[in-house]
Each structure stands twice: as C-alpha cells, then as structure tokens.
Amino acid sequence: MPFNIPETSLPRVVIVGAGFAGLKLARSLGKRKFQIVLIDRNNYHQFQPLFYQVAMAGLEPSSISFPLRKIFQNQPSVFIRYCNVDRIDPEEKRIYSDLGFLNYDELILATGATTNFFGNDELAAKTLPMKSISEALHLRNSILSDYERALSTRDWGRRQELIDIVVVGGGATGVEVAGALAEMKQYILPKDYHELPYDEVDIYLIHAGPNLLPGMSEQASRNAEKFLKKLGVRVLKNSRVMNYDGEYVSTNDEQKIKAGKVIWAAGIICMQVPGIPEETMGDKNRLQVDQHCEVLDLPNVYAIGDLAMMQSDPGYPKGHPQVAQVAIQMGKQLARNLNRADKSQWEPFRYRDLGTMATIGRNRAVVDLPRWQFSGFFAWIVWLWVHLLALVGVKNKIFVFLNWVWNYFTYDQSLRLIIRPKEDPNGPSSPNRNI
C-alpha cells in the first residue's frame, strides 16, 4: 500500500530522521522547489545534549523537545509521517515502512546513532542508556524509585545497592551525568531524603581510556577530572567494564563494584539500514559517503549526521566526529546543494570546527575553542548560552532559562516526579523496531 501523500510535479525529497541533521536539512530546503517528506519514529525533535538534565530532574521533557508539525505548520509542501522505515530499495527508489511504501527522487538518511553495548547482550539488558527522552525519563524514575526504597531499607548492603550508581563512559555525556548526580547528592538528598545517610552514596565514573573527554584537549580532561573529584565522584580510568549481572559491575582489571544501577554512556553505534549494501558500511555501521554526502555507489541516496562517514575531508581522514555541529553543518550544506538545479555547481562539504564543551555541575565547565581553551565559571556561562540558543522554539528557550535561574539560586529542582507511562511494546518508539 502506498503512503497517503499526494503526487506532484515537484521532486520528492524523503528525509528519514528528524534529529539535528534531518531537521536542519528540511528547514533549509527550498519549499517551492521540492515536496518534502520528513519521517521519524517520534513526532517531535529532541535536543540530545540536555537529556541528562531531564534524567536528573532538572528540566521537563517538553522543554527540550518540539513538535515537528509545529515547526512546519505553515509549509504545505512539507509532510510529516510518524512511522518506522523497514527497508529501502535503491533500485526502485522506494522506501518501505509500517505505513506502506513511498517512492522518492532524493533520499536522505539521517537516522543518527544509538547506544553501543559492543555486542554484550547482558549489558544491553541490565544497564540504563540515555539516547532518547523516554530513556532519560526511565533513568529518572529508576533513580528516584531507588531512593524511595532505600528509605525503608534497614540492611546496609541492600541500601548501598539502591543508592550507589556507576556511570560507564568518560565522554561528555558520562562526565555531565556524573557531575549532575554528585550535585544531586550534595544539594537534593539532604532536603528531600534527609532520613537517608547521603554520605553513603557513592558515584563511580568508569572510563576505558587514560583521559576523560577523549575528543577534547588534555587541559580540558585534567580540569574535568579535577572538578569531578572535588564533587566526590570516584573516577576509575583505564578500566573497561566487562559485565554487569544486576548486582556487581566487573571490570577487566578484576574490580567488582556493587551497584543496583549502571548508566551506560560508553559509546554509540549507527543503526543498520536494511537495503543498503554491506560494502558501503564502515566502522560502527556508518555509511561511506562522498564529498557531497552521497552514499558510495548509490545515486540519489545521501547520509548525513552521525550516520555519514566522509573520508574525503582532508582534516578528517577517519570521518568526522559524531557531534551535533557536524550534523547541522552537513544538513545545511546538503540543502544548499540540492537547491542548486545543476549538480556540477555543488560544493563539497568541509567541516568547520566551532569548538567542544562539557559541563560538570554548576559553575564548572570546560571549553575547547579552535584557538583557546578555558574552564571554570566563564566556561559554564558559555556552555549555558550556547545550549540555550541551540534549542528550538522561543518558549522552550524561556522555560529552560527560567529553570536554570531558579535552580541556580535555590539549589533546588521541582521536577522530582516518578511518572510511569504505559509503553506500547509495538509502537514506533520501541527499541525493537528498525529505524
């Protein structure tokens, strides 16, 4: 059965994924030049860099998400479809989904990446990832529920299992989560859970490499580690998590840490796209693309964002970093090229590194700009400002700003609610679905 989308004389551009790359592309394309179909398994855009603040009860989920139909409500040439793509057929120039099939003239894959458990099914089943708003809410529920249970637990060992938390992965997400947990222990537990001996709460950050924040400078890595240790986080470097049985975390250096919760932030991997030849896939299922983001040997099929592995950019022979700025710039450049009717006038993509940053609690952040590295309070202000401007929607910017101001002056948050929505196991957001 075909999609219920009207036929038109305009070329049809199908975009799969409404993350940073897909949304930027859809908003930058000439609306009078194309019929645009934007497909996603959520009906909203979500701002991934602030997932951890939702998980730590610092922000409402609605503050960092924005309805796709709201973004394009005045653009009749843009069609939004809430579904999963099952496979694509490049020869027929057609995609298949749970809504039926859809023909395309240009297909752009911007499906992003998901959590990488490195093939360990037990880790996938028993640890807590944080790559979506629903996963962030699940993590928030788990943390708050365990604090509630710990209040009524007399056994010291069982109580430690409930309140101790292990974070795996020393990248930006892991560092930010560990810092937020440490601040929750310092400022929130004495207020909300004053019966709980909060000094018993141990927060571990386990990182397989020698330096935290491996994509940033050594100075940023050192400062981040210093900030975390000052907050009381136990940082374990050069230690790889091999297994977690639901009670103990086991590492390659024979350490065993008892914890009831393990937050997994140790890496990402792209989801496979059924119908794409395996020979076009590179490391972590990324699709090899040329300088125009076109998938090698697949005309009119493009990959942008985390999914794209472009090795033709002189500064990035192993592909670009899988960060938001790359995705945004790729979406913008591909839109410029598609807006040009003559393909001979297309310009190659060249990534412009605007810098990298991470925050470690209030008043602490690290920032690496191309010619300047700094940390501390000013870096934290820069981090806040950059992330505030990047949010979609004026209302979201205002709500997040007010939340941050309130939290800063009161050392408190008002979102510590345990909400357990009933999940549809076969719905579009199910992790068992394809794309």
Image: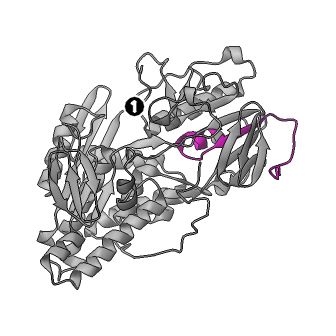
Give the quarter of the image for residue 201.
bottom left
Instruction: Identify the residue at image location x=28%, y=34%.
Output: 216
The residue range painted magenta reads 1-25
Q: Position of residue 41 (x, y in %)?
A: 61, 54
When asked about the image quadrant of residue 124, the answer is bottom left
The kind of residue on which mark 1 rests is Leu
Residue 364 position in % (x across, y down):
22, 50
Task: Look at the picture and state if 227 lies above or below 272.
Answer: below
The residue that disc 1 covers is 354
* 291, above or below 222, in the image: above
Residue 237 point in image, percent of width and height: 17, 43
**189 or 168, which is in the foreground?**
168
Q: Is residue 257 left or right of residue 317?
A: left
Residue 321 as seen in the image, left or right of residue 62: left
Does the stretch in magenta take in 272? no
* Residue drawn at 67 percent across, 30 percent down: 301
Q: Nearer the viewer, residue 54 or 150?
A: 150
In the drawing, does residue 352 fall left or right of residue 173? right
Place of residue 374 in the rendered image (x, y in percent of width and height, measured from the top left): 23, 36
Q: Is residue 99 left or right of residue 43?
A: right
